[in-house]
Image: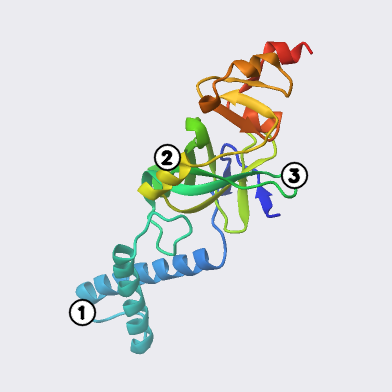
Amino acid sequence: MQDIINCGKWTSTQLLPFLEVSGHISYGKEMFRLLLDFCTCIAIILIVMHCIFHRKSPFNKRKVMLLVFVAGVFNRIAHYVFASNLIGAFYERNDYSSEKYDAYIYNSAFENDDYTFCIATISHHKGISVTWEKGPYFFIYDNYFLEKIELPYGCIRDNLFSFYPDGKYGIALEHLYPSFVLEINDIATSESYEYLKKQILSVDGEIVGSLNGTVYHLQGCSHADQIKSKNIVRFNSPIEAEFYGYRMCANCMNT
């Protein structure tokens, strides 16, 4: 069972009187990429100094200058060549909207719960905002937003929440239903939607609902017999049915 990261609205961290950070910057690969971005900035500075001061600079080690310059230039080129909307990619784009991903949902309350395929729509915005209030004020942001989850049986959950992904974690869907977790995979394709149409939550589940309805029935409920066989959907538990937007029928609540 994977660890779970609880997600919600972002809170900003005031690092310095003139610096505020919203979101999260992880270590390892992310820090290495930031280091390459720093080399890019140094490369630009060296070019400017070369143009203004005619090859004069405070650096005495020309080989070091050349190495930093080359690393910065290649890093900037790689940003354009290998740019990707894939979450966690080394050169993930700073800004993209409504990208769709293959994803899986499971109930963390059950140790051996099956993974259910779905398609998640996510936006990403990362950058630095600078304002001037009695001096420069820097606001660093790195925010992801889970816009929509497309589930089997045509169920859609939208207008969700902000989060920050990590390769080791699943995303807790506590805003929808406690204990349900979402894991993001590759970018979705047309084949993903064909696969989603074929998804069946349960073959022999005792909780029954209609494909065209919003009510579920417990085992033995007489109203369940009125559902046409072609429209029957089965769930493994009432919790699962409620997560998919179904509510218990009045007859079952009174028994």
Pointer 2 or 3: first along the chain: 3
Asked if residue 253 lies left or right of residue 216, the reply is right
Task: Give the spatial CA distance, label 1 vs label 2.
Answer: 36 Å
Asked if residue 196 lies left or right of residue 96, the reply is right
Quadrant of the rendered image containing residue 178: top right
Q: Position of residue 166 (x, y in %)?
A: 57, 55
Give the number of the disc on residue 84.
Answer: none
Q: Which residue is mark 3?
A: 110
Q: Position of residue 71 (x, y in %)?
A: 36, 77
Task: Give the spatial CA distance, label 2 vs label 3.
Answer: 52 Å
Instruction: Label 2: state its secondary structure.
Output: loop
Q: Position of residue 242 (x, y in %)?
A: 64, 27
- Mark 2 touches mark 3? (CB < 8 Å): no
Q: Residue at x 25, y 73 (%)?
A: 47
Q: Position of residue 51 (x, y in %)?
A: 20, 74
Amino acid of disc 2: Glu
Q: Which residue is mark 1?
A: 54
| Label 3, residues with CA under 10 Å away: few <14, some 14-19, many ≥20 | few
Quadrant of the rendered image containing residue 2: bottom right
Instruction: Label 1: state its secondary structure.
Output: loop
Amino acid of disc 3: Phe
Q: How is the image coloured?
A: rainbow
Q: Which residue is mark 2?
A: 133
Nearest-to-viewer mark from 3 and 1: 3
Res. 140 in view = no
Amino acid of disc 1: His
Asked if residue 174 lies left or right of residue 70, the reply is right
- Mark 1 touches mark 2? (CB < 8 Å): no
| Label 1, residues with CA under 10 Å away: few <14, some 14-19, many ≥20 | few
Pointer 3 or 1: first along the chain: 1
